[in-house]
Amino acid sequence: MSGTLSRRSFLKLGAVSAGALVVGQFVPPAVAQAATNAGLLNTKGNGYIPSMCEMCVWRCGLIAKVRNGRVVKLDGNPDHPHSKGHLCVRGQSGLMNTYDPDRVLTPLIRVGKRGEGRFRKATWAEALDFTASKMLDIKAKYGPEAMIFSSTHNLSQVQFENLLYAFGSPNYGTQRSLCFNAMIVANLMTYGMEEPERIYDDQLKYIILTGRNLMEAISTSETSALSAAIARGVKVVYLDPRFTKTAAKASEWLPIKPGTDLAFHLALLNVIIGENLYNRSFVENYTVGFEALAKEVQPYTPEWAAPITEIPAETIRRIAHEFAAAAPHALAHNGWRTSNFVNSFQTQRAITILNALIGNWNVVLRASGGESSSALGKPPQPPYPRASAVRLDGVPSKFPVVPLKIGVFQELRDNILTGQPYQAHGWFIARQNPVMSLPDRTKTLEAFQKMDFIVTVDILLNDTAWFSDVVLPEASYLERYDPLNPVGDKVFLRQPVIDPQGDARSALWIYKQLGERLGLKDYFQYQDEEDYLRQQLAPLGISLQDVKAKGYAQLPEGKAAPEYSWNTPSGKIELQSSTLAKVGFPAVPTWIEPPEPPQGQFYLLTGKVAQSTQFGTQNNQLLHKYADEPRLWLNDKVAADRGIADGDWVEVASQVGKVHTRVRVTPGIRQDCVYLTPGYGHLSKGLTTAFGRGASSSVLHVTYADPVSGGQALTQTFVTVRKA
C-alpha cells in the first residue's frame, strides 16, 4: 500500500495483498476484512471506520479513527453530501460524548422521591420487565391513550413510532412545535411539502435571511454553502434584533423590532406586486390566488411597515427592488424560526410566497427528496390498532392543519395539567429532554408529578432522566447501528465503530425487547440490528458487509419528478391556500399585530450558538472548554442607564419564573431586547460538567402557541432585569 495513497482512495479499496500490509497500521474496514478473511492480519480494534455523526440532527458522514478499540479522532467523510470531508466543532467533539464520565451504562430504577436522583442499578431483564408491567397496568386501567410517547427526530424513530402506534396511544410529542412548526406548515400550505431544498449554485445573487443564524446553526452543509456564496460576492440581507455571527458575515444587518418580520415581508410583497416586479409568466402558469394576495397586501406599503419594524421605508423599498432585480437567482430563506411570535406562521407564508412571485423554483428552490426511500425494504408487520381516543395536544380538532406526526408538544404538556380531555398517567421519553426544552419548566415538573410512571431512554442522566422512574441506557452513536439514512442518491449507514461500553444497548434492541414484553412482537420482526439492516438492503441486492466497508450504498435511479409539481389541492403553488380557507384561517398572508413588552421590560430572545446543540451537548467536556460562559446579553446604553456593568449578576424575571445570571454588556443587541442562550441551568446533578452552569431560559418562557401551526412563540416572553 503506497504511503502517498490519499485517504479518499484508501477508504474505497476493497481488497489488499499480503505484502502491502504493515502490522499495527491503520487500515479501513474493507481492507481489514479482506486481510482477516485471508488469514493475513488481525486488525481488530484498529482502523478507519465510516459512520454518521449525531451531535445534531444534520447527521453528517464521519470517519472514526480507532486505535486499540478506542476512538481517538473523528473526521468528516468526503463521500457524504452533508460533511464533504469536514466536521464542525461539535462533530469533532463527539468522541467525548461517548467517553463522557457521566454516561449511564446500566439500567437504573428510582428508589428515592422523584427528583432526588436516587437510583439503583438493575439488569436489562429487570428494567424491561418493570417498564412493561407499568405500561400494561396503565393501559389496563386507563386505556392506551393514558401513555404519552415523545421523542426528538432520529434515525431509530421509525421503531419508536412502531412502539407508540402498536401500543395504541394517539399521544405523540415531538420537538418540532418548539422549533419549526410554522415553517413546515407554511410550506405544506404553499408548496405541499415540508421544506424545499435550497440551491447555492454559482449563479445565486441575493439572500434574505430572517432570524436564521446559519453561521451558528446545525445545518452545517448549508452553512458551508452560505460561506462560499458570501465569498463569491452574494449579497446577504440579515434580519435579527441581535448581532450574531451571521450578522457579522452579512452584507447588511437590519436590527428589526421583534415580532415585526411579518410587516417587513408584507411590505416587500406590496412593492413587488404593486410595481409589477414579479415573474408574471411563472405566476400565471404555476400559482393560484394571485388576485386575492394582491388585494390583501395593497395597504402594506413600506411607509406603513417602517414605524412598525423600525426599518426605514426607503430601505425596505430598496431591498424589494434589489431582490426582484436578482430574480430568479434570489432566495428568501424561510429558515426554521423567524420572530418566534404567534404571527410567525403568517411570516413564513409571506416568505414562501415571496419566492414564488420571483419564479425561483428549480433555480434556487426545488423539491426535496427528504429522508425516506421506497427503494429500501423493511420488516413485515401487521396493521396498527385504531386509536379511538382524541389527542391531548388538540390535533386535529384545535390545530386542523398540523400534521399528526408533528403535533403541538406544549399543548400536550398543558393538558396533562388540566386533565382534559382525560388524564395521562405514563410517559415514555426517548432522546428528548422536555424538562429543559418545553417553555415554563415549572409546568413541566408539575406535569411529571401527575405521572404514575416515567421511563427515559438516553445516554446521560439528563434533567428529564433525573425525574424518571426508569432510565434505559442507550449506546452512543459511535457504539450502535441505526436504520439506514437515504440522502440524495445514496443511503448511508450508522454503524458501531467500537463496542458499547457497559450494558448500553441500541434503540433498535431496546424497542424490540420492550415490544415483545408488551405483547407487540409482530411489530418487531427482526432478529437483531444487523438483520434489520439486511431487510432494508434486500431490495437493493447489496450486502451489509459492503455497506459497512464504504459507509453507504448507491440507490437505484428513481423516476424523475416533474419539473413543476406540487402536492397541493390545486397542484400548483397556492398563494391563496384552499386548505386554510376551508378551516377558517386567512387564505393569504395577513397582518397580525404582535404584543409589545410593558414599560421597563424587554423581549427575551433565544437562539443557537456554535458550541452546543439545543439541550443535549452542554455536558460535553471538550465543548465546555471552548464555550463562552452563558450570560444575558444586555444593550450597553441600557446597562449604563441602570448602573449595570459587564459581568454583574442580575435577576431576570418573567410572569412564570425568575433566574439569576451574569450579564454580557454589548452594543450588539437592540435596547428593548435581552438574549439568553438556551440549554443551561440544568437540575440534574448527574451532569457534573453542566450542573450549576448558566441559567435556564425554559424557566422564563411563557407558553404561547401560534393558532395555525401550533409553533411555540418563544420571543413573546417579556422580562424584567434588575441588578442582583
Image (cartoon, grey):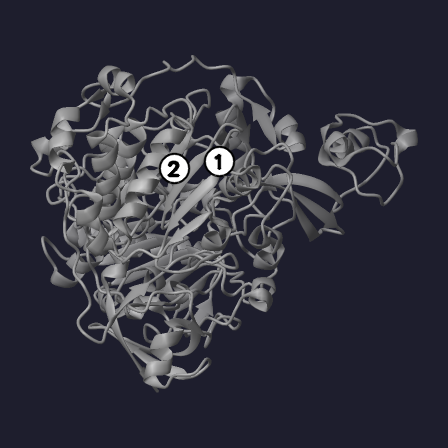
- What's the mark number on residue 293? none
Residue 438 locus on image (x, y percent): 29, 60
Mark closer to the chain start, 2 or 1: 2
Relative to 557, residue 152 above or below: below
Q: Judge whether residue 504 can be spotted in this image.
A: yes
Mark 2 touches mark 1? (CB < 8 Å): yes
Name the amino acid, label 2. Val
Q: Which residue is mark 2?
A: 158
Quadrant in the picture for residue 714: bottom left
Q: Which residue is mark 1?
A: 483
Q: Is residue 628 left or right of residue 75?
A: left
Location of the C terminus (image quadrant): bottom left
Relative to the observer, which residue lies in front, 74 or 189?
189
Name the amino acid, label 1. Pro
Q: How many C-alpha atoms fall within 10 Å of the one at disc 1: few (<14), some, or many (≥20)?
A: many
Dot 1: element = loop
Q: How far apart, in angstroms, are the residues tagged by discs 2 and 1?
A: 8 Å
